[in-house]
Amino acid sequence: MKNIAKIQYYMDLNSFSGRRHIVFALVSFLFLMTSCSKGLEYKRSQGGDITDLDFPVTGDSTATADLIPDSTIIDYLLLSKSAALSITNDSNVVIENLQFENIDGIALNIKGGRNILIRNCFFNKAKEEAINIEISSGIKIENCLFNGVATGVYAMQSKSISVKNNQFINVRQRSYGGRGQFIQFNGVTGEGNSIENNRGENFAGESDPEDLISMFNSTGTANSPISIRNNIFRGGGPSTSGGGIMTGDYGGGYQVVENNTLLDPGQYGIASAGGKHISLINNKIFAKQQPFTNNPLYVWAQAGAGCSDIYVKGNRANWKNKNGEINGGWNSENCANTSFEYPTTITIEEMNVPEHLITMVTPEQLVAIRK
């Protein structure tokens, strides 16, 4: 099927029913670009309290995905080229079938956005974030491919952020003295926040990540915790502080990390560095000995962070630290009301990580775009 590059605006999302009378306006992406060279620093600032913001929570915004039929076959390398785009204080937008290549700054910058779907796009090399989201709600990122960017998806002071079924290759930001993740939430709160069914791979010598997923001062709800589920990641380091999936960083809470598979993710595998009501359950973690490997699974009120109600159960790990010793995890015992079950062992075969993890391109295409 031919992939038609488009940025579409739609109206009356909430009255969507029956015959679905929606008015579309096709906008040429070639002239919707702005300069996105803000030069963001390491965004671990506290910022404002998201509860004080005056925009509505849109929930899952599931109607968005029905507006345009899904493409059945996508050749990401043949998508139409786009310059950097900026969406400011806009709503009800679909960005689809675009390739952002060699962007000198942020590829797609969203500020004050509401109900925005980004689907079937290829972010191929950007000096800063591929997708930067600030003070926005109802943002869905699906079936996108990321390669050689500083950070894949960065969401700050926002609500209802969904990152699903995407694939990430080689994040690089640590080289510039800042952060670098496949996905980072910073001050993301409320219902409907999820990171699910993604794949990612950092190749040694080609990448320089901090964490693969980072939850910084982000909080879901008791009925709708931030969901980090069913992701498969391979490769991390050489950072001596970063690693796989970090929760509770600088606080936050109501986060669930479940059924993820991490192979050689960095200095650590999965961790809670603070926060409240965080569950780390049924994950698989494996690491061979490398100069930076330390711990597969830990709970620690780091730097005096508030920490309580952490639940760790059903995980499996096989982890060698930098000295070649098996490390079975660590409970610092400074988080109140914590239940910590040490992981049981797992073999490399049981990890079941495919040799060709990135499936949105062929093995030959993968080699080509990594250069």
Image (tube, rainbow, N blue to C red):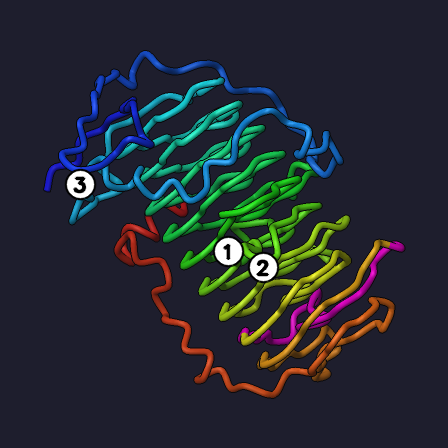
Residue 69, numbered circle = 3
The residue identified by callout 2 is: 236
Is tag 3's residue or tag 2's residue first in the polypeptide sequence? 3
Per the image, label 3 sits on a secondary structure element best described as: loop
Marks 1 & 2, CB-CB < 8 Å contact: yes
* Amino acid, disc 1: Asn
Per the image, label 2 sits on a secondary structure element best described as: loop
Per the image, label 1 sits on a secondary structure element best described as: loop
Q: State yes or no: residue 205 in magenta.
A: no
Seen at 44% across and 14% down, the residue is: 34
Residue 202, numbered circle = 1
Marks 3 & 2, CB-CB < 8 Å contact: no
> What x and y, as percent, mark residue 50?
66, 34
Is tag 1's residue or tag 2's residue first in the polypeptide sequence? 1
Q: Which residues are magenta?
A: 283-304
> What x and y, as percent, mark residue 64?
31, 37
Separation of residues labelled 1 and 3 (CA atoms): 32 Å
Separation of residues labelled 3 and 2 (CA atoms): 36 Å
Tell me if 3 is positioned left or right of 154 in this view: left
> What x and y, as percent, mark residue 48?
72, 29
Q: Is residue 3 above or below residue 284?
A: above
Separation of residues labelled 1 and 2 (CA atoms): 6 Å
Residue 237 seen in the current view: no
Q: Nearer the viewer, residue 345 or 93?
A: 93
Q: Mark 1: few, some, or many residues within 10 Å (few <14, many ≥20)?
A: many
Seen at 38% across and 31% down, the residue is: 101
Mark 3 or 2: the one toward you: 3
Seen at 71% across and 45% down, the residue is: 217
